Image (cartoon, rainbow, N blue to C red):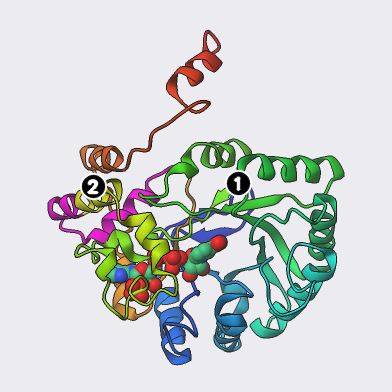
Amino acid sequence: MRLKKLGRTGVLVSELGLGTMTFGWKATEAESHALLDRFVASGGNLVDTADVYSEGRSEEILGGWLAGRDREEIVLATKARFRTGEGANRVGLSRKHLVSAVRQSLHRLRTDYIDLFQVHTWDPLTPLEETFGTLNTLVESGSIRYVGISNFRGWQLEKALQLCRARGWSEPVSLQPQYNLHARATEFELLPLCAAEGLAVLPWSPLGGGFLTGKYRDWVRHAPAGTRIGDAKDPEMYVSRFDNDRARRIVEAVVHVSRSTRKTPAQVALNWVLANPAVTSPILGVRNGEQLVENLGATGWSLTGTQRAELDAASDLEITYPYDRRAEQQQRDGRDPP
Ligand SMILES: NC(=O)c1ccc[n+]([C@@H]2O[C@H](COP(=O)([O-])OP(=O)(O)OC[C@H]3O[C@@H](n4cnc5c(N)ncnc54)[C@H](OP(=O)(O)O)[C@@H]3O)[C@@H](O)[C@H]2O)c1
């Protein structure tokens, strides 16, 4: 696997990250450790978790594995913001919750520092100064090395960046957004913003939770048990997202392109995400070794322009003001760089 710069930092991360949301949920501890071993043996070093995955069990399983490793070889990313227990304050981006969240993650991960500590999503209740001032203190104390963001909107991310710059605080270095062939609205505002500001982009759900592997062709309403969608607590969420003509068109195109590449649909869908120059490292989600090996095969080759164009056309979203071509032309009119 190639290594890439984590945004403007001097840290190098593998071009695919390993997500651990399945640890303690779809994969046992032993299976999870085997996935980590295989990922690292293939040149991977970026591992992503969160305090809420399997109610902390994902971090514990990862911590058990890290304990027997050279910690310096791993770029360890985790997150906090979502509810971790009963009560008014075990949630959010307050100083109270963030400092506790970092302490608890360090304990579960059996390490004394987190490389990338990500704000899991926006918190409308906490002033931005409180959140980013706290994160800056955590960087200065050495508990976390870098600050990352997940699931912010464009204006929220830019506001956080400007605040940190004005105060001389440690700036966010990465964004973890949902991005895949189905979820392309990320291209409107977030990807250009990250490119302009030099932020790393670590897309989550690069396979749309497995939908883009093409395995649900007999459709999401009849998803087999044992799969993410078949076992979903809220299957209607997936039905409303994927039971429509655009989603069907996308999967047809992925399967069609896969036939001409001799790559699997999953590899094609992942390669499409990897090919976007704004993307640093998509975060893989897998529940077993076969899926991991298959998905690692998304690197080391490229879709042709024609194949990418077919996927782009099938997954095209209606672009409206202020992102449409007319608005873009007006903004550029006569002002293109020489
Ligand atoms: N920041 C956030 O808000 C956020 C949100 C979600 C995820 N994440 C991060 O992103 C990571 C990846 O997200 P994700 O799990 O949703 O990714 P994904 O790649 O879109 O979906 C992964 C799921 O697809 C299925 N799958 C994967 N490879 C397959 C293959 N080759 N063939 C058939 N099925 C395959 C598996 O589910 P089944 O086999 O069970 O069907 C697997 O668990 C997570 O682990 C987490 O670290 C972050």
* Residue span colored magenta: 255-276
Q: Which quarter of the rendered image does ligand 1 occupy?
A: bottom left
Seen in the picture, residue 250 relative to 49 is either above or below; the reply is above
Q: Residue at x 45, y 51 (%)?
A: 179
> Magenta region's main secondary structure?
helix
Seen in the picture, residue 278 relative to 93 is either above or below; the reply is above
Q: Residue at x 46, y 77 (%)?
A: 22
Q: Name the residue under label 1.
A: 199
The quadrant the N terminus occupies is: bottom left
**Hey, what amino acid is under mark 1?**
Leu
Q: How many marks?
A: 2
Q: Which residue is drawn at 44% across and 91% down?
A: 30
Circle nearer the N terminus (2, 1):
1
Give the side of residue 164 with respect to residue 293, left or right.
right
Foreground pick, 71 / 199: 199
- Label 1, secondary structure: give it: loop
- Magenta highlight on residue 260: yes
Q: Label 2 crowding class (10 Å Cα cut-off): few <14, some 14-19, many 20+?
A: some
- Label 2, secondary structure: give it: helix
Foreground pick, 325 / 3: 325
Given the current orientation, which residue lies at the most extreme top position? 334
Q: Name the residue under label 2.
A: 249
